[in-house]
Image: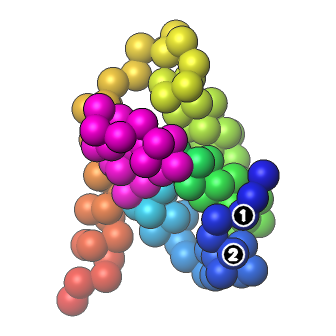
């Protein structure tokens, strides 16, 4: 697999909190959803970035306690976007899940 986020792979990603990582993953999930009907190539590339970022999070040593959830999220994302959607995920579900991390990051960052 070709690494897309080379600067993040070299340690930048691990400097982010888990909430920041998931908020960034959520941005790529939103791009995947938004491009799905307009341009499947753009949507597929966004989803490749989703998988790369979630794999970075899975391999981040500080996320060991969240490893089960991260692996489950990856599994259900793959099922939802390239599988048979046996878990019956929806675009709205994904947006709500990841928006919670955007909110958490904003609340913790703003004074």
Q: Secondary structure at mark 2?
A: helix
The residue carrying pointer 1 sits among few (fewer than 14), some (14 to 19) or many (20 or more) residues within 10 Å by Cα, namely few
Compared with residue 14, is residue 46 higher up or lower down, i.e. above or below? above
Q: Is residue 29 magenta?
A: yes
- Position in image of residue 101 (x %, y %): 36, 57
How would you classify the magenta stretch by its main secondary structure? Answer: helix
Q: Tell me the residue that label 1 is attached to.
A: 3
Please indicate, yes or no, whether residue 92 appears anywhere in the rendered image: yes
Q: Is residue 54 visible?
A: no
Q: Which residues are magenta?
A: 27-46
**Where 43 falls versus 52 (above or below)?**
above
Picture coordinates of residue 88 (x, y %)?
41, 14
The foreground one among 87 and 81 is 81
Q: Is residue 28 magenta?
A: yes
Q: Which mark is residue 28?
A: none
Q: Is residue 89 left or right of residue 51?
A: left
Q: Is residue 74 above or below residue 53?
A: above
Q: Nearer the viewer, residue 37 or 63?
A: 37
Q: How is the image coloured?
A: rainbow
Marks 2 and 1 sit apart, C-alpha to C-alpha, by 6 Å
The tag on residue 6 is 2
SS class, disc 1:
loop
Q: Which quadrant holds the C terminus?
A: bottom left
Nearest the viewer among 94 and 1 is 1
Locate residue 32: give its quadrant.
top left
- In the picture, residue 2 is in which quadrant? bottom right
């Amino acid at each position: 697999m070709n690494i897309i986020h080379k600067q993040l792979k070299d340690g930048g990603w691990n400097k982010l909190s888990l909430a920041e990582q998931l908020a960034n993953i959520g941005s790529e999930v939103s791009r995947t959803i938004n491009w799905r009907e307009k341009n499947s190539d753009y949507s597929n590339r966004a989803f490749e970035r989703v998988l790369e970022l979630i794999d970075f999070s899975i391999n981040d040593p500080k996320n060991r306690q969240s490893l089960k959830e991260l692996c489950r999220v990856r599994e259900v994302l793959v099922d939802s976007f390239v599988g048979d959607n046996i878990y019956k995920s929806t675009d709205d579900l994904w947006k709500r899940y990841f928006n919670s991390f955007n909110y958490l990051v904003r609340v913790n960052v703003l004074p």
